[in-house]
Amino acid sequence: MSTSVLATPRWQQRVFTVQSRDYDWIDVFLEAMVRGDWAGFELQLFQGLACAAEAVEMQTWADEARVDRAATAFRYDRDLLTTEETMAWLEHAGLTLEDWTDFLGRGVLRDEWSLRLDTLVERHRASLVVNDANFAAEGLCSPVFRQFAMALAGRAAVAATLDPSETVPPGRPFKIAKLVTRYAMWLDGLDSTNLAHRLSHLSHIEAHFNACAQSAKTEQALSLYVSRNRLEWMRVDLERLSFKDEDAAREAALCVREDGLSMADVGLDSRQTVRDTADILEQIEPDLRDAVLSATVDELIGPIAIGDRFELALLVGKSPADLSDSRVRARAEQAVVEQLISKAILAHVRWAERMKAPST
């Protein structure tokens, strides 16, 4: 890519304002690079483009029925009930109908060829072309760019709540040269002085945000959140087996319930390893959660359909939510920081009109 797509004028547009400072898409993208979140988006984009290149080479296109289902799901998620509403959404995002359908097709192929993605990226890497259309579609038609924007808005807003007279420990300095080298394909051609200025500002925000977040995570605040979420954050220990066929899952369940076999025995017979999982209740799949909540220790649950699989789960143990459990403490810390961010965004962030509606 000789000229970075980030040089396109649309990415220099304001996304939000905190106090008197405007933040544009370049700031949003740089912050994602600094946090380490950009690499995941980059890989997803490359995988989709590699799948599209493979389809052209092999003359094998994405299944139309699956693309149609993906389009329906996309519209349903965004309450786009009519063709006119969908076209208005695309126009608002600066995308064409072709950009959108190409994005959907790449997603279908990426799912279909999920086990070959690394190979496909390596095979087609030299010929992959990232243009503004496929870049924008990947970020705007998925939740990614909005998530990036919310992450920066939260940090900037929280930093704005800190009293300027307070001393803030210096944050870990960004190695600007290393960052620019790592993301050269995205940053080459952009003004280096401007990039350095933006990154310096992001470093300042990060230090302030981390100081505020750390201060908010008091034992009193954490205990309050645990008391509010004792049920959702109880620790649950499970032994799990997954089956593609419902009849096989039912037969396995009978072996446990009627024949007294262990989950390990059933797993050996079905040539799979029992998955030992320990997590808080809210992290378990919704379709399984209610059954786990009502079950007693040593009770077998299922088969329960989860996605296209049928799950058996043996409840090994339950324990109340407690801050001494690292998982519960981490979840409580997350909740405290999320509340801090939510309040700060409401108080300090003014979104650009293009970010208000239609939402992504």
Image (spheres, helix red, strand yellow):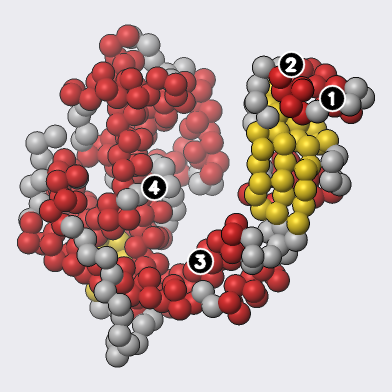
In the picture of the structure, the residue carrying the numbered disc 4 is: 144
Q: State how far apart marks 2 and 1 are (Cα).
A: 10 Å
- Look at 24% across and 21% down and name the residue there: 124
Instruction: Left or right? Give the position of 90 relative to 242.
Output: left
Q: State how far apart marks 2 and 3 are (Cα).
A: 45 Å
Nearer-N-terminus badge (1/4): 4
- Dots 2, 1 in contact, CB < 8 A: yes
Front in this rendered view, residue 121 or 91: 121
Nearest to the eye among marks 2 and 3: give it.
2
- Dots 1, 4 in contact, CB < 8 A: no
Q: Position of residue 80 (x, y in %)?
A: 51, 44
- Look at 77% across and 48% down and name the residue there: 317
Q: Type of residue at label 3?
A: Glu
Q: Type of residue at label 2?
A: Asp
Vertical comparison of 210 with 260: above or below: below
Vertical comparison of 275 with 339: above or below: above
- Look at 13% across and 62% down and name the residue there: 196
SS at mark 4?
helix
Nearer-N-terminus badge (2/1): 1
